[in-house]
Image (cartoon, rainbow, N blue to C red):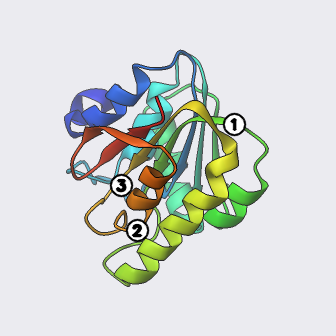
Amino acid sequence: QAAQRLGVRHFFDKAFEFFENPMVLEFGATRKMGNWGDDGYSTIYLAYKVASGGLFTSVDNDYKAIETSRKLIDLYSIKSRNYLVVADAIQYATTTKDKWDIVYLDAWDATKDIELSQDKHLELFKALEDKLHDESIVIVDDTVTKGVKVLPYMESKGWKKVYGEYAQIWSRR
């Protein structure tokens, strides 16, 4: 049921084409129940996508967002290895020891302070670089706001856009 209502998340499906049982890391969890529009349900969808194998971790500094995500995962009885973590995104990225297959960057609300959001996304990607491998996929949401600074940096490091417009998939392949 969740997958049917999330047709707008086709770019997630595209990223999953490259991996069997991926390690998936999301920054910026689902904020509220019932937000089935063009945003807002990435956490439940990514947890659903790894239900048949893999691991999913969502990181958000807002305890309420993590609790909302936990309730949604329970509501839809998604049985996957998922971890919902209350933490600062950059601190988590700096300290994680794992290598990630798919990373989704969607933290820092761009409606509050666009420049801060742009700077934080760039800082976050830099903190993650050594946690990515040659086959990793990075999904950048809100590329016309949050992604303005991180995308040119990624390109300078050999990353290429492989799919999308407003939300984009990037790879080194």
**Residue wearing tag 3:** 33
Q: Nearer the viewer, residue 52 or 67?
A: 52
**Where does the image place residue 87, in percent across and percent down from the top left?**
67, 64
Q: Secondary structure at mark 3?
A: loop
Which dot, 1 or 3, sits closer to the camera? Answer: 1
The residue type indicated by label 1 comes to: Lys
Residue at horizontal 50%, vertical 19%?
Answer: 19
Rendered-image quadrant of the N terminus: top left
Q: Secondary structure at mark 2?
A: loop
Vertical order, 101 against 97 (above or below): above
The residue type indicated by label 3 comes to: Met
Q: How dense is the environment of label 1, judged by Cα within 10 Å: few (below 14), some, or many (20 and up)?
A: some
The disc, 2 or 3, on the residue closer to the chain's N-terminal end is 3
Residue at horizontal 39%, vertical 45%?
Answer: 42
Query: From mark 2 to mark 3, how far is it between C-alphas?
Result: 31 Å
**Residue wearing tag 2:** 149
